[in-house]
Amino acid sequence: MFNSKIELKKGNNMRLEERMSQALKKVDNDRYILAIAVGQRADELSKGAKPLLEQNTQKMKYTDIAIDEIASGLLVIEGLVDRD
């Protein structure tokens, strides 16, 4: 049973890494811009803004919601130009 908990924890970390990777792609791999955007969005959510995600977000942290919104393309960071 102890091993299954370790596997579960690895799975959760991998999920976060995947979400962060997707979110970084949306901001041209600029960690500074991503950190600012996540912080601002988390602040908006803490002040009552409604999440853009369709999934249940009641048990999620504001920062996780913000990362998911950016990673899924629901929240676009203004001022960034897609260089592709």
Image (cartoon, rainbow, N blue to C red):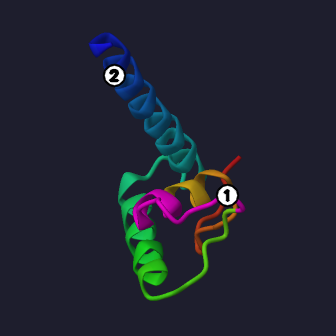
Q: Nearer the viewer, residue 78 or 51?
A: 51
Q: Nearer the viewer, residue 1 or 33?
A: 1
* C-beta proximity under 8 Å, tags 2 and 1: no
**View extreme (front): residue:** 1
Q: Magenta stretch: residue 56 in it?
A: yes
Q: Which residue sits at x=50%, y=56%?
A: 67
Determine whether, in the image, residue 73 is placed left or right of residue 69.
right
| Mark 2 neighbour density, 10 Å: few (under 14) some (14–19) many (20 or more) | few
Could you say where residue 12 lies in the image, as x and y percent from the top left?
A: 43, 33
Badge 1 marks a residue whose secondary structure is loop
User: In the picture shown, does residue 27 fall above or below 4?
Assistant: below
Q: Which residue sits at x=37%, y=70%?
A: 39
Q: Which residue sits at x=51%, y=61%?
A: 65
Could you say where residue 70 lies in the image, as x and y percent from the top left?
A: 58, 59
Image quarter (top left, top right, bottom left or bottom right) of the N terminus: top left
Q: Which residue is denoted by mark 1 in the rendering?
A: 55
Q: Which residue sits at x=67%, y=57%?
A: 55
Query: Quadrant of residue 27 in the image?
Result: bottom right
Answer with mark 2 or mark 1, whichever residue precedes in sequence: 2
Question: Magenta residues, as a range?
Answer: 54-66
**What is the three-letter code of the residue carrying label 1?**
Gln
Determine whether, in the image, residue 58 is placed left or right of residue 83.
left
Q: Which mark is residue 5?
A: 2
